[in-house]
Image (spheres, rainbow, N blue to C red):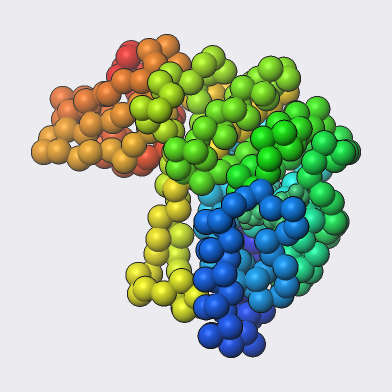
C-alpha cells in the first residue's frame, strides 16, 4: 500500500494531535451532550454539531467507527467493480470527513472529493484533520457548506457517499437526497447504523436507487426484493475499530477495540459482479463443521453447513468472516454450497 494513503492508524494519529488541547472534562461533557442530542428528536432545524467542542467530541467519539463502516462498504463495492476507479467523489453530510478518509484510502489515485455539510465547525475540523493526514488526496478535498433538502443541487460525480446521515433527515429530505444522488452519481454508497431502523432506511434507499435505474453491487447478491420479511430481522454487518487512548478517554471503558454494527448499500449505474452469496451472520464454528448464514442470489436466505468432508472449502469456511462473499473467490466451486 502507498504510504501516503490514509489508514485507520493515520486517522487516529491526526485525531490525537488535533484534540490534544481539549480538556478531558470538556470532551466528556461534549460527548454526553452529543449522545443526548442523537437520542433526542432528530431531525433538527439546526446543526447538532454547533461548535468546536461538539465537533471534536464527534470526531473522537464516532469518526474512527464511521470510517471503518464506510471502508467496509467501499471494499465490497471494489470487489464487485474491481476495474472501476472514481475520478470525482461527493460526500454528502460528510461532517468531519470520515467517508472521505475511507475513499482516499480505497483507491491509489484517490478521486477529487467535495464534502458537503451544513455544520461549519465540522467542515473546519475536517479540513484540519485532512491537512494533518499528509495524504495528497485528502489535502485536496473541497469543504463546502450546503443544506440537504429538496433544494439541494448535486453536480455530476462518479461516487456519492452518504454515511450516517439519513437518520438526521425528515422522510421527505431523505427521499430527495437519495433521488439526487441517484441522478448525479455513477455509484452511490449509503451507510447507516446496523439497527432495525437503520436497516429500514437502507432498504428504503435501496428501493429508490433501483427505481432510479441503478443496480445493487453490494452487499446483496441481486437487485430483487430483500428476502428478509419486514420486522423479523435486519441485515447488518460488523467492523472492528481499534480504540486509541483518546478514544478510550472520551468513550470510557478500557477495551482496546469495539465492533461497529452498520447496514449499507452500494449501487451503480454501470454493470458490476455482485457476489453469489454473502455471509450475513458471524459464522458458527463447531467441531468439524462451520455453519454459515447466507443471503444467496438464487435461493434467498439459507444456512450452509460446511464440514471437514468438504476439504479445501471447509478450510476456507473457517477463515470466512461475517460480511464476506461465499464461496470465497479462491475456493473450488461446489454447486449450491
Ligand atoms: C452523524 S454525522 C455523520 C458525519 C459523517 N458522514 C460520518 O460518517 O462520520 C451526520 C452529519 O450530517 C450533517 N447533516 C445533518 N442534517 C443535515 C442537513 N439537513 N444538511 C446538511 N448536513 C446535514 C450533520 O451536520 C453531520 O455532520
x 28%, y 30%: residue: 292
- Residue 3 seen in the figure: yes
Q: In the picture provided, is 6 more to the left or to the right than 179?
A: left
- Residue lying at the far left of the rendered structure: 287
- Residue 163 seen in the figure: no
x 68%, y 44%: residue: 169
Above or below, 95 relative to 53: above
Measured as percent of width and height from the top left, residue 331 is found at: 36, 28
Measured as percent of width and height from the top left, residue 330 is found at: 40, 31
Instruction: Please name whichever residue, 212 or 290, is drawn nearer the observer in this view of the structure.
Output: 212
* Count of residue discs: 0
Q: For the N terminus, which image quadrant?
A: bottom right
Instruction: Please name whichever residue, 322 or 166, is drawn nearer the observer in this view of the structure.
Output: 166
Q: In the picture provided, is 289 more to the left or to the right than 276?
A: left
Above or below, 69 relative to 302: below
Measured as percent of width and height from the top left, residue 62 is found at: 55, 62
Residue 47 falls in which quadrant of the image? Answer: bottom right
Measured as percent of width and height from the top left, residue 157 is found at: 82, 37
Residue 304 falls in which quadrant of the image? Answer: top left
Instruction: Please name whichever residue, 280 or 270, is drawn nearer the observer in this view of the structure.
Output: 280
Instruction: Please name whichever residue, 295 or 193, is drawn nearer the observer in this view of the structure.
Output: 193
x 58%, y 66%: residue: 34
x 29%, y 34%: residue: 317
Above or below, 284 relative to 59: above
Q: For the C terminus, which image quadrant?
A: top left
Amino acid at each position: 500500500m502507498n504510504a501516503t494513503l490514509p489508514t485507520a492508524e493515520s486517522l487516529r494519529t491526526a485525531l490525537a494531535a488535533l484534540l490534544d488541547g481539549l480538556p478531558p472534562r470538556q470532551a466528556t461533557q461534549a460527548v454526553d451532550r452529543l449522545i443526548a442530542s442523537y437520542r433526542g428528536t432528530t431531525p433538527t432545524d439546526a446543526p447538532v454539531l454547533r461548535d468546536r467542542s461538539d465537533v471534536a467530541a464527534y470526531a473522537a467519539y464516532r469518526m474512527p467507527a464511521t470510517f471503518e463502516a464506510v471502508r467496509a462498504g467501499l471494499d465490497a463495492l471494489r470487489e464487485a467493480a474491481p476495474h472501476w476507479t472514481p475520478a470525482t467523489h461527493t460526500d454528502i453530510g460528510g461532517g468531519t470527513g470520515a467517508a472521505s478518509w475511507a475513499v482516499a484510502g480505497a483507491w491509489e489515485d484517490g478521486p477529487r472529493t467535495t464534502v458537503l455539510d451544513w455544520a461549519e465547525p465540522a467542515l473546519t475540523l475536517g479540513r484540519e484533520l485532512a491537512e494533518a493526514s499528509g495524504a495528497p488526496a485528502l489535502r485536496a478535498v473541497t469543504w463546502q457548506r450546503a443544506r440537504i433538502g429538496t433544494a439541494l443541487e448535486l453536480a455530476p460525480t462518479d461516487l456519492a457517499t452518504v454515511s450516517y446521515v439519513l437518520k438526521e433527515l425528515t422522510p421527505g429530505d431523505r427521499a430527495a437526497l437519495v433521488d439526487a444522488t441517484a441522478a448525479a452519481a455513477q455509484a452511490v454508497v449509503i451507510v447507516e447504523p446496523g439497527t432495525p431502523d437503520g436497516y429500514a432506511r437502507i432498504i428504503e434507499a435501496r428501493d429508490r436507487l433501483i427505481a432510479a435505474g441503478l443496480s445493487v453491487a453490494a452487499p446483496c447478491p441481486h437487485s430483487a426484493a430483500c428476502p428478509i420479511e419486514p420486522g423479523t430481522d435486519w441485515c447488518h454487518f460488523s467492523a472492528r475499530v481499534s480504540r486509541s487512548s483518546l478514544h478510550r478517554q472520551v468513550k470510557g471503558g478500557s477495551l482496546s477495540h469495539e465492533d461497529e454494527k452498520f447496514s449499507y448499500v452500494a449501487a451503480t449505474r454501470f454493470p458490476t459482479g455482485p457476489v453469489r452469496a454473502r455471509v450475513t451472520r458471524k459464522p458458527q464454528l463447531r467441531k468439524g463443521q462451520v455453519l454459515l448464514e447466507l443471503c444467496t442470489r438464487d435461493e434467498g436466505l439459507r444456512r450452509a453447513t460446511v464440514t471437514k468432508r468438504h476439504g479445501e472449502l471447509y478450510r476456507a469456511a473457517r477463515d470466512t468472516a461475517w460480511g464476506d462473499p461465499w464461496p470465497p473467490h479462491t475456493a473450488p466451486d461446489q454447486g449450491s454450497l
